[in-house]
Image (tube, rainbow, N blue to C red):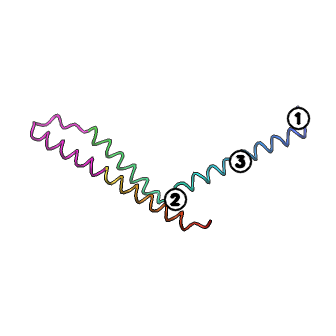
Amino acid sequence: MPLSRPRKLAARVAVGGTAVLLLATTAAAASLRLHDPRLDLADAAIEKAEALLQSTSCDELNDKNAKECEKAVARALADLSSARVEIAAAQAAQDEGATASAPQ
């Protein structure tokens, strides 16, 4: 059974409204990330490295070597954590710069 004229119009309005909503949502999401996407990739790589280091086991070594291994892993984790902080600062700086220079 074919739709009546008002129902066709309502269906078109619903589809059009949905399309506009999707476009607006996509534009809003895109505007939230103005920094270089490679910074996101670098952060993800560091997060993976942290997970790998946290799962590292130094238990199979003798006591002296195990302690050295644990210290080295702890230092590496601290350095990676510091690197993630610096990446976040770079992202924020790029986002602020892009927002400040964007026409309003």
- The three-letter amino acid code for the residue at tag 1 is Pro
Residue at (81% x, 40% y) in the render? 11
Residue at (53% x, 66% y) in the render? 100
Sooner in the amino-acid sequence: mark 1 or mark 3 = 1
Q: Is residue 64 magenta?
A: yes
Give the magenta range.
56-80
**Nearer the viewer's eye, disc 1 or disc 3?**
3
Q: Give the SS element for disc 2.
A: loop
Q: Give the SS element for disc 1.
A: loop
Residue 60 in the image: state x and y as whole percent.
16, 34
Label of residue 2 in the image: 1
> Which residue appears farthest toward the top when viewing the image?
1
Does residue 2 appear to the left or right of 79 in the view shown?
right
Residue 17 in the image: state x and y as whole percent.
74, 46
Mark 3 highlights which residue? 19
**Nearer the viewer's eye, disc 2 or disc 1?**
2
> Which residue appears farthest toward the right when viewing the image?
5
Residue at (17% x, 34% y) in the render? 59
Q: Is residue 31 or residue 53 the one in the foreground?
A: 31
Mark 2 highlights which residue? 34
Q: Main secondary structure of the magenta part?
A: helix
Residue 87 in the image: state x and y as whole percent.
38, 56
Q: Is residue 94 or residue 64 the one in the foreground?
A: 94
Is 82 located above or below residue 63 in the figure? below
Residue 66, quarter of picture: top left
Residue 72 in the image: state x and y as whole percent.
19, 47
Does residue 3 appear to the left or right of 26 in the view shown?
right
Q: Are marks 1 and 3 in contact (CB under 8 Å)?
A: no
- The three-letter amino acid code for the residue at tag 2 is Leu
Within-10-Å neighbours for mark 1: few <14, some 14–19, many 20+? few
Q: Give the SS element for disc 3.
A: helix
Residue 9, quarter of picture: top right
